[in-house]
Amino acid sequence: MSRIPADHRPDSTFALLRDGYRFVTNRCERYGGDVFQTRLLLRRTVCLRGRAAAELFYDEELFQRHGAAPLRVQRTLLGRGGVQGLDGAAHRERKAMLMSVMTPTGVRRLGQLFEDEWRARIPVWERAGRVVLYDEVGLLLTRAVCAWAGVPLAEAEVGRRTADLHAMIEAPAAVGPRHWRGRRGRARAERWLGGIVERERTGLLPAPDGSALRVIAEHRDAADRLLPRRIAAVALLNILRPTVAVDRFVVFSALALHEHPQWRERVRAGDAETERFVQEVRRFYPFFPLATARVRRPFEWQGYHFPRGRLVLLDLYGTNHHPDLWPEPGRFRPERFTDWPGDPFSLIPQGGGDHWAGHRCAGEWLTIELMKRAVTLLTSAMRYDVPAQDLTVSLRRMPALPASRFVLTDVQGA
């Protein structure tokens, strides 16, 4: 049996913060494989990348999620008691609850709400002169997903709620004020949504049939118990927050259209070209960097021993850029998806494996729909200029964005 190659630093937490999305890949290349071990936050940790690693990582007989995510991630991004930290029957039950609102009709309805919000905003952008796309799309997505989920949201609240959702997304890998803003934002959001759940349950706020609010507020577990109020709020946030996070993919879509202008005409040609373009945006640009799990029982893989309880990180970004999976991974080439078979372990920007029973993101179909709508709107519903600005995307910052957040000028409705 071989020993897993080791990074001999006493602790690599600061190296992870310094290297960002390249942390795992840099060391895999150094050690000549797709696995190494290190210490993060003083815990022994095995880091993996690649298709075989992803298939292994999503084997629920070998891995569990309970106790895997650091508390700083639970207290900001995921929420304590969220579906991402459940295993077995409890996870399947909670995941089925979330997936029940991800119907094709529901996905299209959210896409239409988002498109309607975007089109209504174009005249405001025309008058503004200068528009920061990231800031605007976050507000549009907050309005759209709250309406879709049945969550009441006054216009005066939109900016505050969007800021809290953004703060949660920004906080896990941050230190100092950015991290603490995320913790405060989550606490406010859980109180807000907990109150809404309680009002729905008491009949003061009847939610539409099939809406996320109604499904979550009235869900009963295997023991016929309602979810505790805070856990119901966490579940609802696990629909709202990831949907608002799609604003990053929308900004990356605008960046890709700017840097590869030949695709503006191609995506106008039809849904197939738009689908390929969107999938390559999801593969190419950095979204969330890593997924975490713990070894459920000892096993061997590729000649390496994995002891029970060992923390394991799967490199999502590194797998999406693995040269064995994606020829010329550093080039933006949507054509690569022309005959792509839909492998659930090679394209994993939102996790791998099965949507229904596994830990792949429940909202992935919503993400693709929203991105396709945004690309169509950017190319067919408006004209705009992209002035000189800093469009660099630092892979050291997690989660990443273009430095300027993508500025538009001279917007005109088409």
Image (cartoon, grey):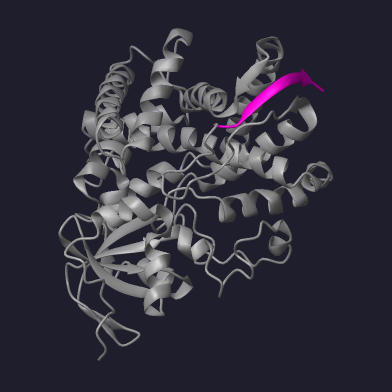
- Tell me which segment is drawn in magenta: 405-414
Question: Is 408 contained in the magenta span?
Answer: yes
Residue occupying the point 54% across, 61% down: 347
**Quadrant (top left/top right/bottom left/bottom right) for the C terminus:** top right
Percent position of residue 289, x then y: 41, 53
Front one among 188 and 50: 50
- Give the total number of marks visible in the rendering: 0
Regarding residue 410, the answer to whether it shows in the image is yes
Q: Position of residue 112 (x, y in %)?
A: 65, 29
Query: Looking at the picture, how far across and down is residue 345, in whole percent?
Result: 49, 66
The answer to whether residue 152 is visible is no
Q: Is residue 344 above or below residue 139?
A: below
Residue visible at 77% across and 25% down?
A: 382
* Quadrant hosting residue 388: top right
Main SS of the magenta segment?
strand
Verify whether residue 226 appears in magenta: no
Identify the residue shown where x is 46% and y is 55%: 355
- Left or right, 132 with reference to 40: right
Q: Is residue 127 shown left or right of residue 401?
A: right
**Splitting the image into 4 quarters, where does residue 217 fall?**
top left
> What residue is drawn where x is 57% and y is 71%?
325
404 or 135: which is nearer to us?
Answer: 404
- Up-down relation of residue 324 to residue 64 (above or below): below
- Which quadrant of the figure has residue 383? top right
* Quadrant that contains the N terminus: bottom left
- Seen as rendered, the residue at the extreme bottom is 1
Q: Image check: 23 left or right of 177?
A: right
Residue 108 location (% of width, % of height): 63, 36
Q: Nearer the viewer, residue 334 or 91?
A: 334
